[in-house]
Amino acid sequence: MKVKRQKRGIWSALFFGLFFSLFSPSVSEARGPLISAKSALIISLKDWQPLYDKSSDLRLPMASTTKVMTALLTVEYLQGDESVLIGENATAVPPVKLGLIEGGRYRADDLLYGLLLYSANDAGVALAEKVAGTEERFVGLMNQQARELGAFNTRFNNATGLPGEGQYTTVNDLALILYHALQNEKIVRVMQTRYASIDHNGRKLFLRNKNRLLWECPWTVGGKTGFTRMAGHCYVGEIKNEDNEFIVALLGSKRLWADATALVDYGNKRLTSPREEEITPAPKVKKTTNQTARKIKKGKKAAKKQTAFKSKKTEKKQTAFKSSKATRKQAAFKNKKITKKRVASRSKKIKKTIQQATKKDDKHGA
């Protein structure tokens, strides 16, 4: 019976151990922010060390964060003031798009704003055809550039990030691509723009940047969003202030801005140095306060002793003074009594002598 119970105990321990190892989060993830993204990374730009890592090498679709590479090649091959002729392929792509008109002409920089702020797919195809002649050739340039940058776990098959077979990246590669893209001042300027207007077929088309962190986090250098049903919500962006500089990348999120904000907050906490007040150990402060309290108690005891001693001394003086005063009064009273008795006895003697003298005179006559 004992052997059977031991075997049951061993099997139950193995079962629960396997259960918790499979379904409980790892120690590194439990300490980090709670996010819904399948993969996420916070990486410091000072030493390129990860501050938070959740499946950073997992290959996943990247949606419109693909446009970071499209923009990087665009600014390398085009000056920005070129006229871009819009072809049939650009107008045929599904939304999101600017609604470019086939046969129309647009400035390359206007299309770059539409690509990065509004995430327009037709602008991406139009720029790809301007740079390489066809989107397929442009995709070849994209994959070559990825290998040159060291993003070996990345593969593109279009210039927009629309769903495609065999298209994937990792948050590690995505952070690397954004880092190199933000070395270009034009890309930084465009990504930091909240609102812009471009010339669209003789009228102004107003654009609003989809990167919400530009409003919620003032240290946002730049970033790019992305979403498809297959990829979920995606984001990559750089944060920089006086003390901290890091890149946040996430793929496969269900709640984009909650995840992105949690990662930014966590990165700032990891890199922010503690203040001097926080460094000072608490026990020393408690020790000094105890010492001062003891000194105060000693002072109070000494003061009590001194006051008690003084009161006793004054009481003794007062009693001695009172007793001496009483003895003086008693002595004076006794002295007065004695002198009165002496005066009375003398006066009696004098009276007797006078009476005797008068009797003698009466007998003998005058």
Image (cartoon, rainbow, N blue to C red):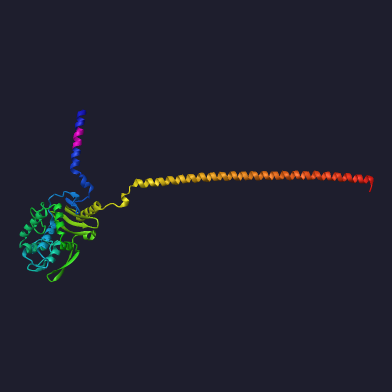
Location of residue 2 in the rendering, given as x and y in whole percent from the top left corner: 21, 28
Q: Is residue 357 visible?
A: yes
Q: Is residue 292 magenta?
A: no
Tell me if residue 7 comes above or below residue 78 in the rendering: above
Q: Is residue 37 visible?
A: no
Location of residue 92 in the rendering, given as x and y in whole percent from the top left corner: 8, 63
Location of residue 349 in the rendering, given as x and y in whole percent from the top left corner: 83, 43
The structure residue drawn at horizontal position 79% and vertical position 45%, both measured from the top left corner, is: 343
The residue stretch that appears in magenta: 8-14
Question: To which quarter of the image does residue 340 belong?
Answer: top right
Task: Tell me the quadrant of the picture where the N terminus can be found.
Answer: top left
**Relative to 136, 64 lies left or right:** right
The structure residue drawn at horizontal position 87% and vertical position 46%, both measured from the top left corner, is: 354
- In the picture as drawn, the residue positioned furthest to the bottom comes out as 202
Question: To which quarter of the image does residue 210 belong?
Answer: bottom left
Location of residue 102 in the rendering, given as x and y in whole percent from the top left corner: 7, 67
Depth check, front residue: 235 or 352 = 352
- In the picture as drawn, the residue positioned furthest to the top comes out as 1
Q: Is residue 11 magenta?
A: yes
Tally of numbered discs = 0
Q: Label the magenta part by its dominant secondary structure.
A: helix
Depth check, front residue: 7 or 333 = 333
